[in-house]
């Protein structure tokens, strides 16, 4: 290793990350830890020790660095074993084992808890989300709901406030292998999934080898001589272009600074250096949509307007002829239009998302729970709203009120009844505006 000011030189790629608990950029190479607060602060060196069952080559090849305000950790690929950098030693802290079922899973943090979503193991991909429990030091399944995403491994992920975005990746299993192109969003407050749509084809890195740097809250990735950055508005990808990006191997983003690891091919070595993000990326090449915004179907709209015009014209002609004959046209009966409240719209979205899969009636309590300690008050509030919603839907669709909501029993446990919306009610056909 050779040090030139804030540039470090290594024979092999080191382990790089940012430590929130220490507010420092960290680099591990063999038994040496390099630490710096950022630009203007020289690298400080210290010796680190490994437990008997761990060495540097194993740590670099099989473990993923992930940091929280609690400290700096290393999670084995495939989930299970967890090591921590404690003072001058890397020690194992989990009471688990090498799971081997979430290889290439997306590892991320929320409120200092380490999560892993998706991954590949035992000959197929999965869509599970697991988390490391700090009390038991074991891994547990985080149960999620909503529009369950397809099984996936690899791809990209980034976090915005209380939502985690996953896109791209591959689904592998007994039904074959295929690339994914949709964006799956997991709300980390309600733990519900939703689908945002398909990634824009204009910047989509389809069938390309992409180096992704979504460590913690970073949103940068390299595609050839381009770097992609997903913007904070979630629907903009900024593309930067430079030949210097082709040597970039690893990148850690923190604030306005970047920690780079890049190959120096003429010397067969790797350089690690701190740079200003703005200076390194340079001016944007182009800005494109992350997920295409739906555009109106103008042909359909024009056809509908023409049909409405013809109907009105026909009625006026009929009315005019009736007046010529001295006949009074029959008054038009205008049906009162039912409108849904905001709460009812939210409930309808929930019904449409779950479809015929259904849910337990008690799941609706979350729409009416305003912190009341009295369960009877909560139940009465829900029953009144369900009767009103049933009446409105019957009026809108013409379906009998008693057939608006249907029930079925679980095959696995006949004691439980699942509630679901009559499948004949289609939001696109009934004019239900949500």
Image (tube, grey):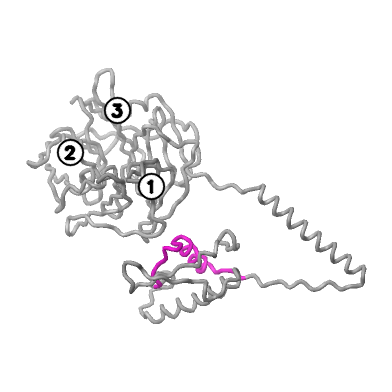
Give the image location of residue 174, x and y in percent: 32, 46
Tell which circle, 1 or 3, labels the residue nearer the N-terminal end.
1
Q: Residue 72, can we see it?
A: no
- The residue mark sitting in front, 3 or 2, is 2
Left or right, 177 with reference to 139: right
User: In the rendered image, which residue does mark 3 sit on?
Assistant: 262
Magenta includes 396?
no
Magenta includes 355?
yes
- Along the viewing direction, whichever of 377 and 382 lies nearer the viewer: 382
Quarter that holds the C terminus: bottom right
Residue positioned 30% across, 33% down in the render: 250
Tell which circle, 3 or 2, labels the residue nearer the N-terminal end.
2
- Mark 2 neighbour class, 10 Å CA radius: few under 14, some 14 to 19, many 20 or more: many
- The residue mark sitting in front, 1 or 3, is 1
User: In the rendered image, which residue does mark 2 sit on?
Assistant: 59
User: In the rendered image, which residue does mark 1 sit on?
Assistant: 166
Q: Which residues are magenta?
A: 338-361
């Amino acid at each position: 290793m050779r040090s030139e000011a804030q540039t470090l030189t290594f024979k092999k790629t080191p382990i790089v990350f940012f430590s929130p608990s220490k507010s420092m950029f960290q680099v591990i190479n063999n038994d040496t830890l390099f630490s710096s607060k950022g630009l203007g602060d020289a690298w400080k060196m210290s010796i680190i020790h490994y437990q008997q069952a761990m060495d540097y080559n194993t740590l670099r090849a099989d473990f993923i660095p992930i940091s929280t305000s609690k400290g700096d950790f290393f999670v084995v690929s495939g989930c299970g074993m967890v090591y921590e950098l404690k003072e001058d030693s890397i020690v194992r802290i989990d009471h688990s084992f090498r799971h081997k079922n979430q290889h290439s899973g997306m590892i991320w943090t929320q409120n200092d808890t380490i999560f892993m979503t998706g991954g590949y193991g035992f000959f197929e991909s999965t869509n599970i989300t697991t988390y490391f429990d700090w009390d038991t030091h074991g891994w547990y399944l985080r149960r999620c709901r909503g529009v369950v995403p397809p099984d996936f491994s690899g791809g990209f992920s980034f976090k915005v406030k209380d939502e985690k975005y996953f896109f791209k990746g591959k689904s592998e299993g007994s039904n074959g292998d295929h690339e994914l192109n949709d964006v799956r969003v997991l709300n980390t407050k309600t733990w519900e999934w939703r689908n945002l749509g398909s990634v824009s084809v204009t910047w989509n890195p389809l069938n390309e080898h992409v180096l992704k740097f979504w460590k913690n809250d970073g949103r940068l990735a390299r595609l050839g001589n381009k770097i992609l950055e997903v913007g904070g508005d979630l629907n903009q990808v900024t593309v930067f272009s430079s030949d210097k990006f082709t040597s970039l191997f690893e990148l850690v983003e923190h604030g306005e600074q970047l920690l780079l690891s890049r190959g120096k091919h003429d010397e067969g070595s790797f350089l690690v250096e701190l740079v200003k993000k703005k200076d390194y990326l340079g001016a944007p090449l182009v800005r494109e949509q992350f997920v295409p915004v739906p555009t109106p179907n103008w042909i359909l709209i024009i056809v509908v307007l023409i049909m409405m015009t013809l109907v009105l014209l026909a009625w006026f002609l009929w009315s005019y002829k009736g007046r010529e004959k001295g006949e009074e046209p029959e008054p038009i009966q205008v049906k009162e239009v039912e409108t849904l409240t905001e709460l009812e719209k939210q409930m309808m979205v929930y019904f449409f998302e779950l479809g015929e899969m259904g849910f337990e009636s008690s799941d609706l309590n979350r729409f009416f729970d305003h912190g009341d300690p009295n369960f009877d008050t909560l139940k009465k509030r829900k029953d009144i709203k369900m009767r009103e919603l049933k009446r409105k839907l019957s009026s809108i669709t013409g379906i009998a009120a008693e057939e608006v909501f249907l029930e079925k029993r679980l095959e696995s446990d006949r004691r439980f009844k699942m509630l679901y919306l009559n499948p004949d009610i289609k939001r696109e056909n009934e004019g239900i505006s949500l």
